[in-house]
Image: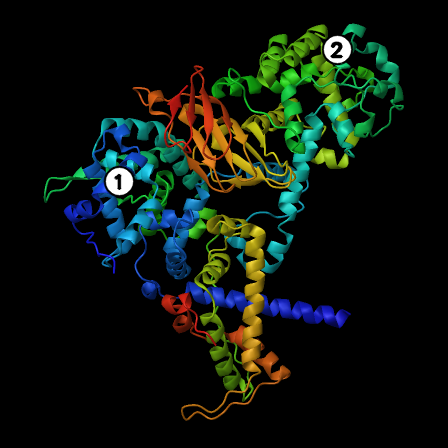
């Protein structure tokens, strides 16, 4: 068996060395024989896979021998819309690596010396850690009633011990919260443990942020929603609101562990000044302006004017209680501002998807949002693949007609459609909506029957229909 | 026999496609910008002329080609090239942000992220896009004339920016290669090519290496252009699987499988060629097949010394595009 392994390893090494030598030989080739470099038109068409098979093969042969063109292609690819997931994973991967750095994910020239064979085999660890970090941060921020559904093994959210229940919100408020937090959890809540599983979390940590709920839904790939007319948010304002969000969220956490039970390290954090109520209101507005849930949140916040201190304690306690894994992401020693930044980042990611669209089959999903980002899942939301977006405007609404046909509409006249599930094409808006200064309407809703027929709604309420895939539009 | 058309002249193009040009113009919504059909036809003719070069394509080929184009983007580019105000307003409103975003991404990739620089790089295109008057005929030549609608306008703009960016690095006379500059890494390691010939060389060493050279050349001739591109991107440019996947619009796991298959195919092809007897040919004596131990030695010698010049096998793209069938 060992000798078999040795043989296998030897063969692998030989294959790798041979391929490396051939690659180096490719680099030393003179490009004279590769012909003249293509112009930007061909390079762009190649990047979009718009060339025919013969032409593609011709230029691929050129690119294989032309370092300049390969670099241009590389720069071109790098300047495309960076997939959110990758950004998210990289950022959170860095976050993890600053604590534990289990995997080197840098790709510098200094790596050249090491064997690439092992690189690609181990590279899966980087996104896996990133995803794990996303989950940990998300679990830390999400409301506990969701955690119960998930059954996650660890969470950042701490639980108020049973004997602290009297410190919970008054009955009327608890009634309101019970709409989302099953009452039986209260009864079955175990005694306080040094480490709490998500199942043990007190329902008094009721969810107060619909955006977080949406995120949970998005992650599960179960529901679909789109931004309704009037819900559109100015990105600058949203950014400002988001700045206020972590404080507000801390203020909203209603679980009230006794201050004496907090770890000593967190005493300083507990001394943090109370977050102004206005921030909480802003947060609730960001999470879902005008919704009844938001009002409930505001009420809940109003009923607990000084909970911000306790919320800080809750977070800090959770970080210390979960230790190990969680400590890698949000260490107990981390300053509140650092934790706030991390929470802010999570909410930023949430804000990036304004639309989660589900095809009738249920297996194909799209999510789209800020900056024109589009991602698609073909496995009911388990994995997401970034797609080339035809616009960098924010997508505000969409509709998935089938597993391959989907429409998106967004700010500043942005309309797009895919007919094959993979390639998105920009669709020109109705000419009536082009303003004199080039400013276009924001589209806030879209309905569609198929890849050809759709109705879009402008922010001013006007509706336009097309029956030819957006080539012409009629005002309704 | 379809009538051949001449793409060199606008009059002949219009004569051939007078009826279709109107439909194409309508499809491209050229009227939005006040673009005339003649100006749009000139854009189409230029595009087809570029695509087919000196060849004389059949009308059906030209029609199929035009249908494959991004006509709306082409109409916008033609209108901008003509200096039509509405088109420019739309272009600025829709593409300015894209351009800055792309420039910013490119500079970020080179480790020189700076909003001002990104803005400068993006805005540097505008003068060329608007065009400068030629000293010869006084006609304004816009960069938009080089957009032929084969890709989205936004992708073409990024490609133009990418070319500028890469060429700027290449002509700046830096001693640091673009790779190192872009990755912010140390100067690229050059594989030392010090042939380590042992004191008592194997008398068959030269024979083994000769056989290996021929076997490898045959194996490489069988690689498709895409396979060569993948190898060059991975082993030369040191791109990650994800980056190659993005370049070729394939999933990184597909690229990984490609690479694994390529490596295995190369080894197996060379091994089989070494272990096959070569019959006498053109006055050269027959060469016996190498046994397993000799094959092992041939691989060892080859990988250690690598005295091969693969330019013959690798620098003939047309040969690679149509690999010879064994």
Task: Identify which residue, A347 or A100, lies in the foreground.
Answer: A347
Image coordinates of residue A199 in percent, x first then y, are: 81, 28
Q: Disc 1 is attached to a residue of which chain?
A: B
What secondary structure is found at the residue carrying circle 2? Answer: helix
Q: Is residue A321 above or below residue B247?
A: above
Q: Residues within 10 Å of mark 2 (few under 14, many from 20)?
A: some
Q: Which mark is residue B144?
A: 1
| Discs 2 and 1 share one subunit | no
What residue lies at 75% left-to-right and 21% top-to-bottom?
Answer: A314
Could you tell whether B114 is left or right of A8 in the image? left
What secondary structure is found at the residue carrying circle 1? Answer: helix
Q: Pointer 2: what residue?
A: A176
Image coordinates of residue A107 in percent, x first then y, are: 54, 50
Q: Is residue B290 above or below residue B19?
A: below
Are the residues flagged by discs 2 and 1 in contact, CB closer than 8 Å?
A: no
Q: Disc 2 is attached to a residue of which chain?
A: A
Q: Is residue B139 above or below residue B174?
A: above
Could you tell whether A17 is left or right of A297 in the image? left
Q: Give the residue furthest to the front.
A: B1
Task: Identify which residue, B290 or B36, lies in the foreground.
Answer: B36
What residue lies at 47% left-to-right and 52% top-to-bottom?
Answer: B248
Task: Identify which residue, B230 or A260, lies in the foreground.
Answer: B230
């Amino acid at each position: 068996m060992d000798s078999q392994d040795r043989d296998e390893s030897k063969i692998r090494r030989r294959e790798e060395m041979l391929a490396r030598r051939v690659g180096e030989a490719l680099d030393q080739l003179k490009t004279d024989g590769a012909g003249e470099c293509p112009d930007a038109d061909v390079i762009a068409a190649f990047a979009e896979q718009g060339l025919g098979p013969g032409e593609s093969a011709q230029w691929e042969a050129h690119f294989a021998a032309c370092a300049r063109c390969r670099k241009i292609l590389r720069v071109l690819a790098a300047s495309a819309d960076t997939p959110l997931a990758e950004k998210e994973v990289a950022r959170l991967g860095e976050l993890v690596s600053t604590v534990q750095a289990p995997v080197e994910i840098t790709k510098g020239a200094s790596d050249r010396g090491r064997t690439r064979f092992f690189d690609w085999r181990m590279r899966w660890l980087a996104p896996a850690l990133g995803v794990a970090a996303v989950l940990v941060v998300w679990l830390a921020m999400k409301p506990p009633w969701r955690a119960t559904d998930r059954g996650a093994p660890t969470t950042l959210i701490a639980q108020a011990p049973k004997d602290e229940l009297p410190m919970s919100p008054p009955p009327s408020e608890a009634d309101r919260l019970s709409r989302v937090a099953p009452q039986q959890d209260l009864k079955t809540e175990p005694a306080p443990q040094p480490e709490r599983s998500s199942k043990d979390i007190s329902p008094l940590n009721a969810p107060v942020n619909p955006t977080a709920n949406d995120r949970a839904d998005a992650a599960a790939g179960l529901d679909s929603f789109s931004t309704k007319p009037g819900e559109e948010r100015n990105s600058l304002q949203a950014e400002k609101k988001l700045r206020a969000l972590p404080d507000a969220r801390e203020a909203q956490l209603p679980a009230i562990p006794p201050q004496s039970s907090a770890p000593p390290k967190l005493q300083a954090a507990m001394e943090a000044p109370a977050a102004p109520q206005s921030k909480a209101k802003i947060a609730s507005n960001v999470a879902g302006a005008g919704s009844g849930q938001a009002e409930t949140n505001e009420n809940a916040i109003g009923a607990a004017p000084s909970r911000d201190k306790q919320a800080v304690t809750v977070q800090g306690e959770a970080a210390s209680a979960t230790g190990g894994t969680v400590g890698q992401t949000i260490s107990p020693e981390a300053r509140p501002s650092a934790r706030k930044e991390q929470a802010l980042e999570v909410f930023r990611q949430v804000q990036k998807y304004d639309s989660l669209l589900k095809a009738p089959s249920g297996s194909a999903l799209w999510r789209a949002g800020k900056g024109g980002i589009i991602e698609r899942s073909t496995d009911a939301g388990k994995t997401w693949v970034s797609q080339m977006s035809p616009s960098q405007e924010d997508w505000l609404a969409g509709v998935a007609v089938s597993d391959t046909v989907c429409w998106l509409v967004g700010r500043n006249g942005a309309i797009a459609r895919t007919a094959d599930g993979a390639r998105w094409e920009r669709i020109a808006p109705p000419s009536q909506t082009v303003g004199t200064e080039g400013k276009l309407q924001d589209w806030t809703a879209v309905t569609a029957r198929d890849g050809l027929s759709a109705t879009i709604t402008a922010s001013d309420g006007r509706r336009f229909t097309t029956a030819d895939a957006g080539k012409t539009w009629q005002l309704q | 026999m379809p009538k051949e058309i001449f793409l060199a002249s606008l009059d002949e193009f219009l004569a051939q496609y007078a009826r279709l040009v109107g439909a194409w113009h309508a499809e491209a919504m050229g009227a939005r910008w006040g673009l005339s059909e003649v100006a749009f036809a000139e854009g189409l003719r230029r595009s087809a002329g570029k695509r087919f070069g000196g060849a004389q394509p059949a009308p059906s080929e030209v029609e199929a080609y035009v249908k494959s184009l991004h006509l709306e983007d082409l109409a916008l580019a033609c209108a901008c090239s003509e200096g039509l105000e509405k088109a420019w307003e739309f272009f600025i409103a829709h593409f300015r942000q894209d351009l800055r975003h792309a420039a910013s991404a490119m500079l970020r990739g080179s480790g020189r992220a700076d909003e001002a620089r990104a803005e400068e790089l993006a805005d540097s295109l505008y003068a060329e896009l608007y065009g400068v008057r030629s000293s010869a005929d006084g006609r304004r030549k816009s960069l938009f004339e080089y957009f032929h609608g084969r890709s989205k306008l936004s992708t073409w703009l990024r490609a133009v920016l990418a070319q500028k960016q890469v060429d700027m690095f290449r002509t700046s006379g830096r001693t640091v290669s673009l790779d190192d500059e872009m990755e912010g890494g140390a100067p690229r390691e050059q594989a030392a090519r010090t042939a380590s010939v042992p004191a008592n060389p194997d008398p068959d060493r030269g024979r083994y290496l000769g056989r290996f050279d021929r076997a490898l050349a045959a194996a490489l001739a069988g690689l498709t252009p895409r396979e060569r591109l993948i190898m060059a991107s991975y082993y030369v440019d040191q791109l990650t699987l994800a980056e190659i996947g993005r370049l070729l619009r394939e999933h990184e796991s597909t690229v990984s499988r490609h690479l694994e298959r390529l490596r295995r195919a190369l080894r197996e092809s060379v091994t089989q060629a070494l272990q096959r007897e070569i019959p006498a040919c053109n006055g050269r004596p027959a060469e016996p097949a190498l046994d397993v131990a000799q094959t092992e030695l041939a691989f060892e010698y080859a990988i250690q010394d690598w005295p091969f010049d693969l330019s013959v096998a690798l620098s003939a793209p047309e040969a690679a595009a149509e690999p010879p069938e064994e």
